[in-house]
Image (tube, grey):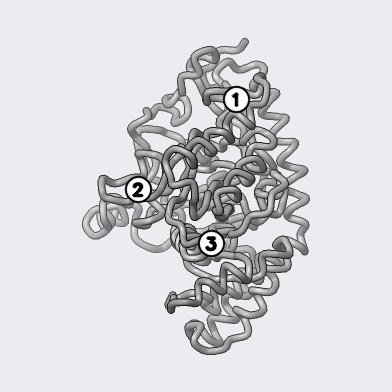
Amino acid sequence: MQNQKLSQDRPSIPPYDYQPDPYVGLSKQQIIDLRQQYVNPVVATYYQQPIMIVEGSMQYVFDETGKRYLDGFAGIATINLGHCHPHVVKAVQEQSAKLQHTTTLYLHPTIAEYSKMLVDKMPDHLSMVYFVNSGSEANDLAMLMARVYTENFDIITLQNGYHGMSGNSMGLTSQSTWKYYTPHNFGIHHAMNADVYRGAWNNHENNVAYKYANEVKNLIQYATSGKIAGFIAESIQGVGGTIVYPDGYLKKVYDYVHQADGLFIADEVQTGFCRTGAFWGFELHDVKPDIVTLAKGIGNGVPLAAVVTTPEIAQAFTQKIHFNTFAGNPVSCAAGKAVLEIIERENIQQNCAIVGEYLLKSLQHLQETHECIGDVRGCGLMIGVDLVKNRQTKEPNFELASWGGDENSYKADRTSDLALIPRK
């Protein structure tokens, strides 16, 4: 086995026929000073020397010096079609020049046309769309819809999951890094995560999917009245480390949830729009959710999110007035339409499946010769590499993952020295 030290021979990124405009704005240090003086300090940056991105083109971004980076971060799994895709830019510019905002109190063609396009990509029973502005909002709204429709209160979710940072969606999130010490967990219960690498059971054991699914069943039985409003899960956990559930797990969980009169909410904020090689991540599990939440790649960087559900659930929500000022914004919906058009025109789903399979196998080949790689997992272009200090203990190697950092610091690493922006 090779030593797990990083190679000093750095591969170069391929040539790219694009020249960014010369940057003539404030210096990086001036921007840092302004942020420190006026921007809430919780809005942090990566790296010892933060990267200042001033321009983007497809899979690349450029800093103020013109240095080009291969963007493996994609704005937190958001720029699915590449930075400044010409078709998306054109759609946004044309709509913005005509009408930027109306609210849904008035008719506008874009929201209606886009809703149909989105529904056409869904299973037949999911035909009602409610637009919002972020994944946190979408999951917050889905939770409310489930409670209103079922007239039950309890929500089940998974340990290690991430579902947002609003007051309510923070309760769904099960990672201490993203939770403040405020009341937000009432009526929300976190089941054991179905992690076959670091969890209680692995893929070498019999009935592993059923063992993990029974943890949800037990939680319903012992932590609730036996009736729940719903269960929410990512199709593949994103922020939690690209956790892929065992085959059959979600299908069995669906059965337990429906037996408890609950709804199944598929959080497709990160896994949606072909990232996994399937159009929707839940398709990998052969399940049909009652509610689907969408964000991130939906607008290729334009603020847009959506909740898609059945006519029956949507109708129950009409017993009160619910309104969102920017929901269905014409410019955002124009971007959403353009995204769906490009996915079809450029065969994005097929590309994710083919390139993703190649990348997964290539990383697994590296795993064979590098002891520091404990696990490689994922689907399509949603792939995780688990770096460890020891394959037997599976102790995470934070220093290697951040190249000089540690588990408590995003700033200590030197990843910005590379011409690659990774996700970690």
- Relative to 365, say whether 277 is above or below: below
- Percent of width and height locating residue 361: 72, 30
Identify the element where label 2 is drawn: loop
Please, what secondary structure does the residue beneath circle 1 have?
A: strand
SS assignment at label 3: loop
If you read the primary sequence from the N terminus, does the residue marked by circle 3 or circle 2 appear first? 2
Total marks shown come to: 3
Splitting the image into 4 quarters, where does residue 86 fall? bottom right
Front residue of 174/148: it is: 148
Quadrant housing residue 37: bottom left
Q: Return the residue nearer the eye: 35 or 234.
A: 234
Pointer 2 with pointer 1, Cβ within 8 A: no
Q: Residue furthest bottom?
A: 106
Nearer the observer: mark 2 or 1; the answer is: 2
Residue 91, image x, y percentages: 62, 75
The residues bearing labels 2 and 1 have C-alpha atoms spaced at a distance of 32 Å
Residue ID at (44%, 60%): 140
Quadrant in which the N terminus is drawn: top right
Residue at position x 51%, y 83% from top? 104
Q: Which residue is mark 2?
A: 185
Q: Is residue 198 visible?
A: yes
Mark number displayed over residue 375:
1
Instruction: In this rendered view, identify the residue nearer to me: 184 or 79.
Output: 184
Kindly identify which residue carries mark 3.
Answer: 301
Callout 2: few (<14), some (14-19), or many (20+) C-alpha neighbours within 10 Å? some
Earlier along the polypeptide chain: callout 1 or callout 3?
3
Disc 1 residue type (three-letter): Asp
Front tag of 1 and 3: 1
Q: Position of residue 422 (x, y in %)?
A: 52, 40
